[in-house]
Amino acid sequence: MQPEAQSPVDPTTVWIVEDNPDYRETVQELVGSAADLSCPQAFASAEDCLEFLNEHLAPDVMLVDIGLPGLSGVDLVQRVRGFSPATQLVILTIHEDSDRIFDAICAGASGYLLKTATPDEILDAVHEVLRGGAPMTPQIARRVLNLFTQMNAPKWDYQLTDRELEVLAEMVEGKTKKQIGAALFVTHHTVDTHMRNIYAKLHVHTRTGAVAKALNERLVPPNGAV
């Protein structure tokens, strides 16, 4: 009696969203060449992908560029995550600044690769994300670690008053004592007093030292808004 033939396993479905036609075609051919993967769809924009997704089953994995025309890759990740939570989304982009990385991860990306990744690294990333991993190129992994280290760093309470925080925010903006006084409707002598108090509380001796500590420890919100 002959053993029953095993039914073939369906390949993992991967879609690509990439506006560069040459790179899009290269990655599609790469993924399609793997025995256990298929790449039936590749889109030039987030809008095209979402329109197709409205009438078809979502893929197992999606490789997404960030700098897309129209809706960004981060927007697409967020929408696909809400529409199909099971789809694994991996960023594949040239962008490596911390803000974009943070936004992508918060939106629901499971991995983040740079386009400098080799063909083997791209295929390994698809397989890794299917195993529950979070594939990242080494420099991106380092940035992610630094981001979360900064977020979880303990905040030292320097006992700055609201007015001192306002003055410090203006200092971060690079304003002179006279300009700070005009912005806060106080004399430059009063500003000088506040600055001396700020130096003492922050344990610094110069304006540069105070600004550096304010930026490194995020003592004032971005753009100097308090």
Image: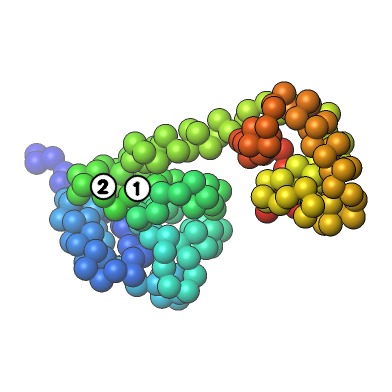
User: What residue sits right under mark 1 in the picture?
Assistant: 113
In which image quadrant can residue 150 be found?
Answer: top right
Q: Is residue 99 left or right of residue 174?
A: left
Quadrant of the rendering where the N terminus is positioned: top left
Residue at horizontal 19 percent and vertical 62 percent from the top: 26
What amino acid type is highlighted by mark number 2?
A: Ala
Observer-nearest residue: 118 or 2? 118
User: What residue sits right under mark 2 in the picture?
Assistant: 117
**Vertical placement of 155 versus 109: above or below?**
above
What amino acid type is highlighted by mark number 1?
A: Leu
Q: Is residue 207 left or right of residue 75?
A: right
Residue lying farthest top?
203
Residue 200, numbered label: none
Observer-nearest residue: 223 or 103? 223
Residue at horizontal 24 percent and vertical 43 percent from the top: 121
In which image quadrant can residue 201 be found?
Answer: top right
Residue 138 shows up from this direction: yes
Observer-nearest residue: 22 or 155? 155
Observer-nearest residue: 219 or 1? 219
Tell me if label 1 and label 2 are in contact, CB under 8 Å. Answer: yes
Residue 97 percent coordinates (x, y)? 45, 49
**Vertical placement of 32 versus 177: above or below?**
below
Count of numbered labels shown in the rendering:
2
Residue 106 percent coordinates (x, y)? 56, 48
- How far apart in space, not on screen, are marks 1 and 2 (Cα)? 7 Å
In what element is the residue under mark 1? strand
Residue 62 shows up from this direction: no
Q: Residues within 10 Å of mark 1 (few under 14, many from 20)?
A: many
In what element is the residue under mark 2? loop
